[in-house]
Amino acid sequence: MRPLTAGAGRAVRPPAAQRSVSRPFWSAGGRSIALPAPARSSSPSSGSGGDTAAAGGAALAGPPEANGGVTPQQQQLAPLAPPDLAPALASFDPPEHEWAWKGAKLGNAAAAVALGAALRFGVPVPEGLDPQGWTLLAFFLTTVAGLVLEPVAAGAWALMCVGCALAAHALTFEEAFAAADSQVLWLIVNAFFLARGIEKTGLGERIAEALVQWFGGSTRSLAMSLALGEALLASGMPSTTARAAGIFVPVIKSVSAAGGSLPTDDESRLRIGAYLTLSQLQSVAHSSALFVTASAQNLLCIQLAEACGVELGPNHFLLWAQGAIVPAIVGTLVTPNVAYLVQPPTVKETPEAPKQAARRLRQLGKLTQDEIVMMGAVAIALTLWTGGESIGVPPVVASMLAVGMLLATGVLDWRADCLRGCPQAFDTLFWFGVLVSMSLALQQHGVIDVFTGWASSNLSGLDLAWPALFGALHLLFFAFHYLFASQTAHVGALYTAFLSLMLAGGVPPKLAAMSLAYNCCLQGGLTHYASSQSAAYYGTGYLKLREVFVGGAVCGSVSLAVWATFGMGWWHVIGWW
């Protein structure tokens, strides 16, 4: 047999015994563990042909008998012997992993689940109600409690709760998503898109700055102009959080700074900043009650009221505005004056504020193309919200037309502004839809009827006239908000129950449903956690915690009095009672 050569440009493979390889076997924490391997000599250079391999010649030169019957060629082609891993593995120290919980707030989740479990297993099923309805009520309680305690995001919690309810056969799939085709839900989504457009184009900031320029000569008139601006924007910008954080908080901070008022110390913040912040926070109570689209909980109230059998007519926008117009305007004018007494500014005049606003308006320049388009879209929406029903265009279609106009003209981008820029729209669509669907299912399973019958039988023994019952329940409903960190969660938890009590006590249905809905709007400034806009204004640093609670209690009480007097009088005029 001819010896193996390195002809044709091929290098000869040295025998296994002469190989020397040191390569990494495991990498951990930046360290490499080298495995031992037999040493080898360097490979010979290959000749042009016919030359035998120089390296390893001595090992290959002997006869097969001298190599245990293995020919040099067989020895050369033998596989590498596996390295001994024992020493490497013995010295290997695996990397340490730090485990940290990244999921839900377990304490809050446990508290929410415990409330539902206590109701289901700790309270007997009432007579006349089947176990499925009682189980559904327990899941509803857990869902609402989770929306208040927020162990996870609202949409995520709703998903988990509705999934468990489906697994427990408390709901069918059709019942769980019965509200998916609700016009109210899609009106909310489109309203978020409109709010995004007003914020993105800068139209909202321009309106606020113009009001400051016109009315900002004194601290009180400045607060009044901001309150009026909030009321005007509420019709087309339905997110109280967006109006607060996106428009009025920046305006208040810039105006206050221009007047030498900063949140750094008491003397500075009390000049004008603390007063403007408190006044604007409390004014939101009336602006959010002025239009049904001014806040998310307003539409939820309408949906729940109709689920309880209250007839509110086809045009919710017009109905809401008709009942709110008088008390909301009075409250908007009164609130800055009450805040002036509760949190008096040390600087009464603000001559620099109009100048500051004028400079800012000059920087903004003329109306941009996007702002003009935005104004046209809002005008179309408002016109159709008011009179569209007469031509067969419901409010949700009006909002779709307005949003479609913004998308078609490029003012809004579907991916950047609607999908990524408005995640709260789809989050609200899901948890709001689940909550409304559960409420409808409670009605279908007779839970509301059982509760109403129980309330009616107990209230009949008290022999209260409906006006007395009406007032007592409103005070209790208002005070309960100290236990809530969300107006929408408050509505979901208590609105249906209190409405049922009023209806059982003889309160006129439309008066009961609409007055409770307006009451929900008046609670947003009670505490620093009462609503998202409250947190935004408190976050400026101009108000101390004690001032928030005192201002919330005083201004909230005055707001209740305004709606109880001017509201009840006006509602009598329009025939609600």
Image: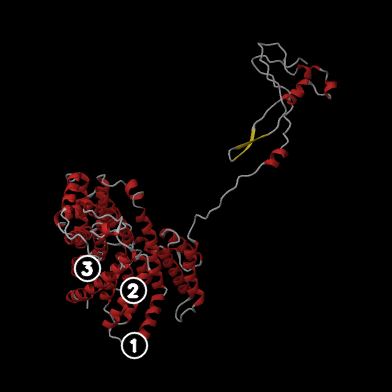
Q: Nearer the viewer, residue 385 or 369?
A: 369
Q: Quadrant of the C terminus?
A: bottom left
Measured as percent of width and height from the top left, residue 260 is found at: 23, 53
The residues tagged by marks 3 and 2 sit, at their Cα atoms, a distance apart of 23 Å
**Residue 341 x, y percent position in the rendering:** 22, 68
- The reply to whether discs 3 and 2 touch (Cβ–Cβ < 8 Å) is no
Residue situated in front as seen by the camera: 521 or 406: 521
Where is residue 455 shown, x and y percent of the image? 37, 82
Type of amino acid at the residue the image marks with label 3: Leu
User: What amino acid is at disc 2?
Assistant: Ala
Label 2 crowd bin: few (<14), some (14–19), many (20+), radius 10 Å:
few
In which quadrant of the rendered image does the N terminus lie? top right
Q: Is residue 63 visible?
A: yes
Chain-order first, disc 2 or disc 1: 1
Tag count: 3
Of all residues, the one furthest to the right in this rendering is: 65
Label disc, if present, on residue 341 of the rendered structure: 3
Locate residue 328, reporting x and y percent: 21, 67
Q: Can you identify the residue that label 1 sits on?
A: 462
Q: Earlier in the sequence, mark 3 or mark 1?
A: 3
449 left or right of 373 in image: right
Asked if residue 310 lies left or right of residue 332, the reply is right
Q: CA distance from mark 3 to mark 1?
A: 40 Å
Identified at 20% across, 51% down, the residue is: 206
Say which amino acid is labelled 1. Answer: Leu
Q: Which residue is mark 2?
A: 479
Find numbered disc 2 in the image and state the secondary structure of the residue it sits on: helix
Q: Which marked residue is nearer to the observer: mark 2 or mark 1?
A: 2
| Residue pictured at 70% horizontal, 42% vertical | 90
Q: Where is residue 568, by image quadrant? A: bottom left
